[in-house]
Image (cartoon, helix red, strand yellow):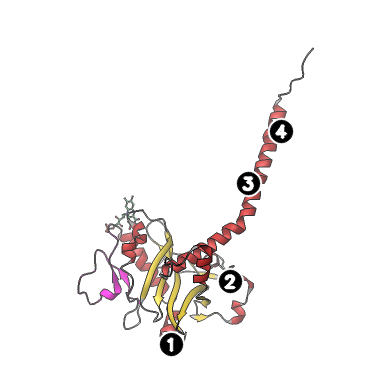
Amino acid sequence: MATERRETVGRTLLVAFVLCIVCSVVVAGAAVALKPMQTANKTLDRKRNILAAAGMLDAGVHGKAGIEQAFGRFDVRLVDLDSGEYAAQDVAARAEFAPGRFDPLLAARDPALSRALGESEDIAAIGRRERFTLVYLLHENDRLSRIVLPIRGYGLWSTLYGYLVLEGDASTVVGLAYYDQKETPGLGGEVDNPKWKALWPGKKVYDEAGRVAIHVVKGSVTAGDPQAAHKVDGLSGSTLTSNGVTNMLHFWLGEDGFGPFLARLRGGTG
Ligand SMILES: Cc1cc2nc3c(=O)[nH]c(=O)nc-3n(C[C@H](O)[C@H](O)[C@H](O)COP(=O)(O)O)c2cc1C
């Protein structure tokens, strides 16, 4: 008696097709289900980075609750970079600027919320600059004591993303920290080296005339240099990344960045 042939090309293709559908449903389902968790982790990570840059991530800050509590000390403000003013209330109340929802980096890609920079303006090589961004202010004893500014700019291989933290005088550096960069480990990647980062606190970003003066030098700052307050040692063998750091600081502290906002704070009208 002839037995029926169970394995046919049609059945093999059907099994492969059904398997593909099942796997895609599982993968898509996992991606959708995990999205809120990923977003929450990303937000928590951003808060952790801001606290670290501000030197507030000490041994007493533990886990999610600790980070949320420490971050809660910041006053998060929406700044209009064109005017240097805090965004008007009706603007800040718009749904797109809702806390936890607004992402200045995404805004920088949106033509309605950003503008393309001309070649001569774009010294940080970022292409577009968002109109509104977030700053994080810490007040202690009714006094502004920390100003956290998001910055970004091109190094040699990558755009470096980080935070520059200034004291309440809007001129003295508390710290500079990058949370995302793809420079070469051991060369440009030394922007993350704690020893190099330790060179920044106390540096003055503006000169007496209010011009951006901070810069990373090639080699070491000479002992006794009268301009030493504006200079930081270069990263060894990494002049191109070092120049990228200088350029992004000049952009974000200048007229097209936070210059007008910081000038207002220095003038006591913040
Ligand atoms: C594989 C490789 C990776 C490099 N990575 C970096 C880097 O991340 N940042 C940087 O400024 N220079 C990097 N350089 C070196 C630059 O090409 C350039 O020589 C250097 O920035 C010049 O700095 P110096 O004048 O201090 O030597 C790299 C070079 C090579 C060959």
Report the disc number at residue 14: 4
Q: Is residue 130 visible?
A: no
Report the disc number at residue 27: 3
Rounded to the nearest whole Å, what is the CA distance between mark 4 and mark 3?
20 Å
- Give the x, y percent position of residue 253: 40, 75
Quadrant of the image occupied by residue 180: bottom left
Between disc 2 and disc 4, whose residue precedes? Answer: 4
- Give the x, y percent position of residue 205: 35, 76
Quadrant of ligand 1 in image: bottom left
Determine whether label 1 and label 3 are within 8 Å by CB.
Answer: no
Rounded to the nearest whole Å, what is the CA distance between mark 1 and mark 4?
73 Å
Q: Quadrant of the N terminus?
A: top right
Mark 4 crowd level (few <14, some 14–19, many ≥20, 10 Å Cα): few
Foreground: 200 or 118? Answer: 200
Q: Which residues are drawn in magenta?
A: 212-236
| SS for callout 3 | helix
Report the disc number at residue 99: 2
